[in-house]
Image (tube, rainbow, N blue to C red):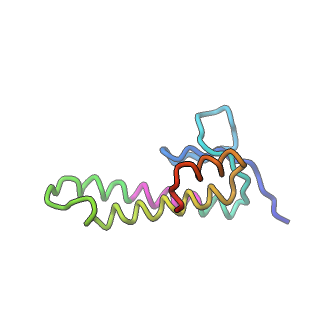
Amino acid sequence: MDNKKTYYIEVATGEISQSATSSTWNYKIEATDEEIIKLREYFDQNYSTEWQNFFRAHVPFVQYHYDRENDAYDKTMKEVYGMLYELGDEEAKKHIESIGILE
């Protein structure tokens, strides 16, 4: 038994809500508790990486494409969008396809 619930996801802030009206959201998904825990872990991981990037940004001689923190952030975002694509409604799937992040 899946026990999936509807969630509304705001990618920029990493917000996961069960209310469509409490705040803005980008994607509507159907997910189990375990899937939401995994998605939350991805968002938390990127939040930590953002802080590392903030401190790294003060080292001017390290270019973006040689920065493993940015690579980690990008990889995690692909994982997030992969989950959103897998769990999302048709509108979510179409939008993710249109931005081409999973290619």
Looking at the image, which is closer to me, 60 or 102?
102
Chief secondary structure of the magenta portion: helix
Q: Nearer the viewer, residue 72 or 22?
A: 72
Of the 4 image quadrants, the one containing the N terminus is bottom right
Where are the magenta residues, as a range? 39-48
Residue 6 spot, x, y in % from top left: 74, 48
Front position in the image: 87 or 16: 87
Does the magenta-highlighted stretch encompass residue 12?
no
Image mark count: 0
Q: Quadrant of residue 56?
A: bottom left
Left or right: 77 as drawn, with respect to 4? left
Is 28 placed above or below 2 here?
Answer: above
> For the point 60% across and 63% down, which residue is it?
38
Q: In this view, does 92 lie above or below 66?
A: above
Q: Is residue 84 left or right of residue 53?
A: right
Q: Position of residue 31 (x, y in %)?
A: 72, 57
Which residue: 42% across, 60% down?
74
Residue at the extreme right of the image, as rendered: 1
Q: Where is residue 71 in the image (x, y as percent from the top left)?
A: 36, 65
Describe residue 86's horizontal placement relative to residue 77 as left or right. right
